[in-house]
Image (tube, rainbow, N blue to C red):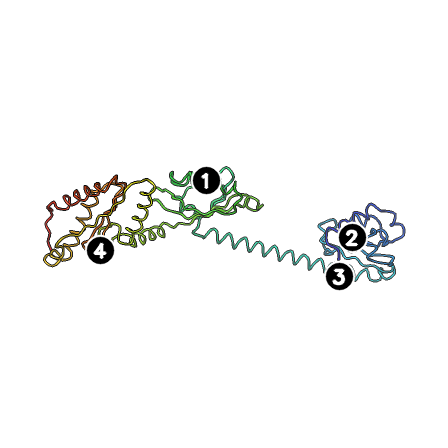
Amino acid sequence: MLPAAEALDLYARLARCPAWAGGTPDGPSQVAGRRTVLVPVAALGPEIAAQLGDLPTALLCPVVQPARPAGGELPGALLAAGSERQLTEMRGSLELLASQAGLATERIALRREVIRQESEAYLRTLVHNASDVILIVDDDTTVRYASPSARTVFGGADLTGTPLPALVDPRDRDRVVGTLDTLRGDGRQEAHDYWRVSRETARIEVEVRCRDLRQDPTVGGLVVTLRDVTEQRQLEHELTQRAFHDALTGLPNRALLPERTERALRRGHRESTTTCLLFIDLDDFKIVNDTLGHSVGDRLLCAVAERLSGSLRRTDTAARLGGDEFAVLVEHAEQPVDAEVLAAHVVRTLGRPSTSRWRR
């Protein structure tokens, strides 16, 4: 069996060599129509002749169905060698074998096409029903294709032809341009980021994965996949808030204070400033809980936290260590006396009577 390229080359070579036609029952018209032809082995060229050895004659049968018109696509050819008498007797059988091979080849090609179309339909269904947004972005950052889910994320507008940076929150547009430039310029195949998308009703946060498929002929652009992670990011923020902040007052807790203290000490060492830590304990707080109840005690703790935060500089940190114990981290103090001045101010602030009516 000869593949299509070799079969076409062989028919072309025979068309340029008409000298063989006088000694055989087949003529050049058979060659021009890519039909079954009986030729001397020598006319097939030295490479094929060497493979067929001393056999004098060859029968070239196109691998096509008998009902197909001549001159159409040629998937291949069947080449048999022997004496002219033998090949003439076997010609019908060889042509039938070639047509069966052509039928099998066509069935294989048809099956491959069916599988390809089914795969495309399957992927198309997945894309059309996926919650993730898939965008194909050209080199000028404009959107060439947007999956149907983009209408949900971006408010129902048609995104085709829209610059990608214009679709995100203005604060993130430089990051979008930077991500796309990095992907195109550094030879990276993939990039990952988080962007904010502003809509009329709310602002959502999306996880972004960009992939460079400009060299893929089926895509020819940057593929940007967006996933709405607003609830996930809010949950992460809440968990972080709960882990490092006091649930009652909202102040940094005992777990966060050492971390901020360590950073403040390093910063103070670099800038040659003093870092101080004040510890505050509320006197007789247990009496409030015992006489007025824990709910009143909680309200009092919140009032203390509010007063404490309001009396500090923006660079200072107030924290609740637990119970009635608080702490203040003082940064950028010129000398220790600055902490003493702040401590006196805190005492005066907390010592003022409260005008609230404390009830059970």
Q: Position of residue 266 (x, y in %)?
A: 33, 45
Name the N-terminal-most of marks 1 and 4.
1
Name the N-terminal-most of marks 2 and 1.
2
- Secondary structure state at the residue bearing disc 4: strand
Q: Quadrant of residue 199?
A: top left
- Residues at badges 2 and 1 in contact (C-beta under 8 Å)? no
Task: Please say if 66 is above or below 342.
Answer: below
Location of the N terminus (image quadrant) = bottom right
Name the N-terminal-most of marks 2 and 3.
2
> How far apart are labels 1 and 4 at the CA level?
45 Å
Label 4 environment density (alpha carbons within 10 Å; few <14, some 14–19, many ≥20): few
Residue located beneath label 2 in the image: 35
Q: Nearer the viewer, mark 1 or mark 4?
A: 4
Using the image as rendered, state which of residue 31 and residue 57 is in the foreground.
57
Q: Nearer the viewer, mark 4 or mark 2?
A: 4
- Secondary structure state at the residue bearing disc 1: helix
38 left or right of 360 in image: right
Disc number placed over residue 53 in the picture, else none? none
Residue located beneath label 1 in the image: 178
Q: Quadrant of residue 162?
A: top left
- Secondary structure state at the residue bearing disc 3: helix
Residue located beneath label 3 in the image: 97
The residue type indicated by label 4 comes to Gly
Residue located beneath label 4 in the image: 322
> How far apart are labels 2 and 3 at the CA level?
14 Å
Q: Nearer the viewer, mark 3 or mark 4?
A: 4
Q: Position of residue 196 (x, y in %)?
A: 38, 44
Using the image as rendered, state which of residue 2 and residue 338 is in the foreground.
338
Name the N-terminal-most of marks 4 and 2.
2
